[in-house]
Image (cartoon, grey):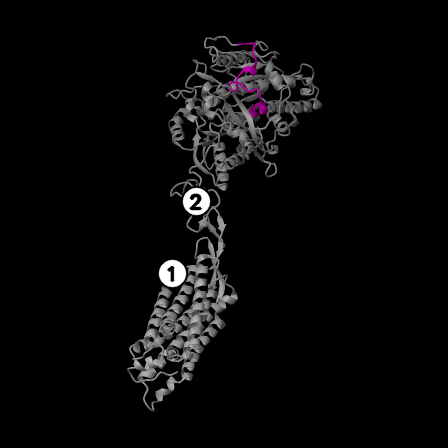
Amino acid sequence: MIPVLLVMLPQHSPSVPQTKKSPCFPKTSPSLSKDGDLVIGTFLPLYSVKVSSAKGAGLFGSHPDSGCRDYKWLHKNYQQALALVFAVEEINKDPNLLLNISSLGFHLYNAYHSDERTLETSLRWLSGQSQLVPNYRFRGQEKSVVVIGGATSALSVQMGTLLDLYKVPQISYGPFDSILSDKSQFPFLYQLAHSDSSLHHGMVQLMVHFEWTWVGLVTTDDMRGEEFLWNLRGDMIKHDICLAYAEKIPVSERRHTESQDTFVPRIMQSSVKVIVIHGDTDSLMILRYSQPFYFFLWKVWISTYHLDITMRPQWNDGYSFHGALSFSQMTKDVPGFKTFLRTVNPEKYPKDILLKEFWCSAFKGQEKLENQDQKECSSNASLEALSLRFFDMTMTSLTYTIYNAVYAVAWALHDMLLMTSERKSIRDGESWTPQPWQLHSFLKNTQFINSAGDQVFVDDTENSEAQYDIMKYLFFQNETETLVKVGHFIPNAPLGQDFTIWEEEIVQSWFESKVPCGVCSESCVPGFRKTPLEGEAACCFDCFPCPEGEISSQMNAEHCMKCPDIEYPNKERDHCLPKIITFLNVKDTLGMTLALLAVFFSLLTALVLWVFVKFQDTPIVKANNRTLSYTLLVSLTFCFLCSLLFIGHPTTFTCLLQQTIFAVVFTVAVSSILAKTIIVVVAFRSIKPGSRMRMFIQPRVSINVILICSGIQVIFCGIWLGTYPPFPEADTHSEYGHIIIRCNEGSVFAFYSVLGYVALLALGTFTVAFLARNLPDTFNEAKYITFSMLVFCSVWASFLPTYQSSKGKAMVAVEIFSILASSAGILGCIFVPKCYIILLKPERNTPEQLKNKQVSKGKIFP
């Protein structure tokens, strides 16, 4: 419903407000008038009338005054009527306006938020057939000069359809609408309100602040509602906020009941807790009159300043909107307005029947709560005593615009009157009659500073962006209510200062002690990632744990990320921990055990060597070439000791020595055994007088076997070191949470070639020894060599699969164990039996015992 201000020229000018009423006043058309030299006709939404939807009750289906219709007072809108009275009285007292020649008056009509009632009332007013305007006729000298009206864009357009025919200027005091700024469509319409094109930005910032991502929207089904929906949705998408639904409510009263059948169930069944309301109080009448109060419980409402959530049919309906947030346009206090409101009462304006009707309706509604038997209203009470539901002592943005609109008309008429007086003198008592089309050039150039200190432009191209206070509505258990400022939104302020919210104040206004959760799906905590639901909005998702080895450190992470190589995920997979650097340390139990075994066996081998040296002249030592025995024992000692290179922090130097020393000393050991085996076979199978095979039992031959076999291995190792040598590396993947420092072989092919060569020598030795195991000999080494090579080959055959399946420092431990086990096998199988005879059975270690037990030809060579 829209207040409409019309400047007209009456034939007489009473100085006090007058009210003429029909038999059904105020149910048909309440009218309050105050005559003056220039009269402002005003259409204000003071009450709503029930519109019949029965057949035959269409536009002009019956006479406007035939019967009385049900109506509901819109008590809080009466502030707009009082602002009109206040502004007119101020202007008439100001000697600087209208040259002190003319005075302002007004006629007040009710404006209807209904197509048929708006058109009907406008036609009655234009035709001059209204019984509420005495002596009014639509003639040239009595034509309207200006119209102030338009609480909504739709009503501005509806009234403008008729007003444009007569070129009557129309000043819209409702919310700014960019569509109405098109002068090609609306050449006679002016807007005084600030632009609210940034309102959706403030609402989205509020959603972002409280992390509301699942929001509903209720707006009017018109161009203004569509524009807001488009802007809001676009800004929400930029901040990953989803619009759950958009309910468009018809702006016509006739269709409110029709929309209720589908609108209400959808809202009730929806799980959306945060709902934005965009539209004016009258357009969204369904939110005030259609539903029981408990319907909106547990919803968080975000309303625009156009919707007054305190206007409702039932007193206790305040619980429905408890904690609601409203973006209210910032306005300055007009000096004297609150004082004026405190002094207004029916006794001050005894002839104002409209005020008396409002007064009794408002105070009866207030007093009925305290005394059900109360039938008389308090005529000498104060508006300040009314609750927020009935009246607000703070000037609203619409009231503020009406106040400015009255002054804009006054200043335009003042400029017009000033120009007229310069061209020709106006005698005392002479009538001055401006034509509607004459006022346009003055209105569009009108600008002034009002009493509150604000610059006011009638030309809407000069309008600035509106600034907003964020208000919260509180309804207490003692049934009192209030609006409290909890923040502000200033669009043109620097980043960081444009939006301010006092979260503590807001949280305390809701039913719970925490921020309501306005989401479609519960947030995914760190350690989880979002997985969209097929066919659902992006804000609806499931949460799944991050895969092994990945983390998510933020809420609602869309992807998990891998930790750096030097870090690993914690158990919750929400952040990375530094990996522990580890290697086969001599201080560890495993490393210390292996090191002690290596030292022990190396000392044991050295002890055996000392025994052999001490008893070097005995038959058992001299059998099968004692030089080879010494060589084998020395190489075994180095085999045990080389395992120590694998223990400790790997360095470039130790990595180069590990495999090469191991390969060479083992080749020397195995080739020594091979040489021993060859001597045994040649001595017992191939020796005949004059045979050339006798040359193979010479000492230099065995030395050559060792040198040749070892030389080939040295060549392999040299090529390996010259091409792809081993190097230290950090293994970050083998063991969870650890960085294994180990030696990389460099060339896997070279590594296995070296091992393969040792294995080939061992296999050849085993084969020869196995064939000679039954040769007659007192100290038959072939049998012992067979056992030793069997142990050796078994150890290294099991080494390969175990090594490949091990990770980290376990690989190093497996190789060390294989070195120790194979070396110990050779030592135990070949030398332990001999040491047993040398140390414990010396009687068997004599030439006589050797001769007595010799059963076959042959010769033992020293």
Q: Main secondary structure of the magenta part?
A: loop
Discs 1/2, front: 1
Helix, strand or loop at mark 2: strand
Q: Is residue 139 visible?
A: no
* Residue 144 image label: none
Q: Secondary structure at mark 1?
A: helix
Measured Cα–Cα span from mark 1 to mark 2:
32 Å
Q: Nearer the viewer, residue 58 or 271?
A: 271
Disc 1 crowd rating (10 Å Cα; few below 14, some 14-19, many 20+) is few
Find out whether residue 609 is within the magenta segment: no
Q: Position of residue 448 (x, y in %)?
A: 66, 27
Say which of 163 and 410 sits in front.
Answer: 410
Q: Quadrant of residue 442?
A: top right
370 over 705 or under it: above or below? above
Q: Position of residue 222 (x, y in %)?
A: 47, 31
Q: Quadrant of the C terminus?
A: bottom left
The image shows residue 146 at horizontal and vertical percentages of: 58, 23
Residue highlighted by disc 1: 805
Q: From the top left corner, tell me how far across and down residue 563 is, in percent.
A: 48, 52
Amino acid at dot 1: Ser
Report the side of 732 relative to 423 (left or right): left
Kindly check if marks 1 and 2 are in contact, taking CB atoms under 8 A apart as contact.
Answer: no
Mark 2 sits on what residue?
528
**Observer-nearest of 264 and 679:** 679
Q: Report if residue 692 is visible in the image.
A: yes
Q: Is residue 466 left or right of residue 837?
A: right
Amino acid type shown at disc 2:
Phe
Q: Sequence order check: which comes first, mark 1 or mark 2?
A: 2
In the image, which residues are magenta?
378-402
Q: Does 58 appear above or below 495?
A: above
> As rendered, which of 46 and 649 lies closer to the eye?
649
